[in-house]
Image (cartoon, rainbow, N blue to C red):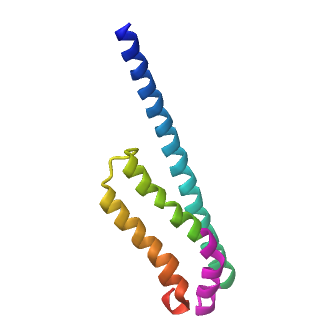
Amino acid sequence: ERGRREEGAGAAMATQSGVVRSYLFAYNVLMALGWMYVLARLIAVYAARGASAETAAAVWDEVAPALKVWQTGAVLEVLHALVGFVRSPVSSTLLQVTSRVYVLWLVAAAGPEAR
């Protein structure tokens, strides 16, 4: 009986591990697709308008909504480290992600001079 309980616990851990791996794979694929979309929009705007100061403003207007979604989605990386899905240090992950989100949401959104 005891062996069966331990087998069951081991099977549950293996399943959880598989679920976590599948989730992380899906998360990374989704994030990669999102960043490819942002890059594609950026390239499309520059290809259509050429390089100029006006184009830079148009690029921001075009990519800012998607950029905010995908960069803010990186906040989940902190959660992944916190709950042990990945072996990243929580403190450095938190610092990296919050600094990027801070720059995007507060500094860049402050005005065109910051972009």
37 w.r.t. 79: above or below: below
24 w.r.t. 103: above or below: above
Q: Give the range drawn in magenta.
A: 50-66
Percent x, y for residue 98? 41, 69
The residue most toward the right is 48
Q: Is residue 39 visible?
A: no
23 w.r.t. 93: above or below: above
105 w.r.t. 69: above or below: below
Percent x, y for residue 3? 35, 10
Residue visible at 40% across and 15% down?
5
Count of marks overlaid on the render:
0
Q: Quadrant of the N terminus?
A: top left
Q: Does 63 appear in magenta?
A: yes
Q: Can residue 30 be seen in this view?
A: yes
Is 56 in front, or is 8?
Answer: 8
In the image, taking residue 53 as reference, residue 102 lies left or right, namely left
Residue visible at 47% across and 83% down?
107
Q: Does 45 appear in magenta?
A: no
Percent x, y for residue 8? 43, 18
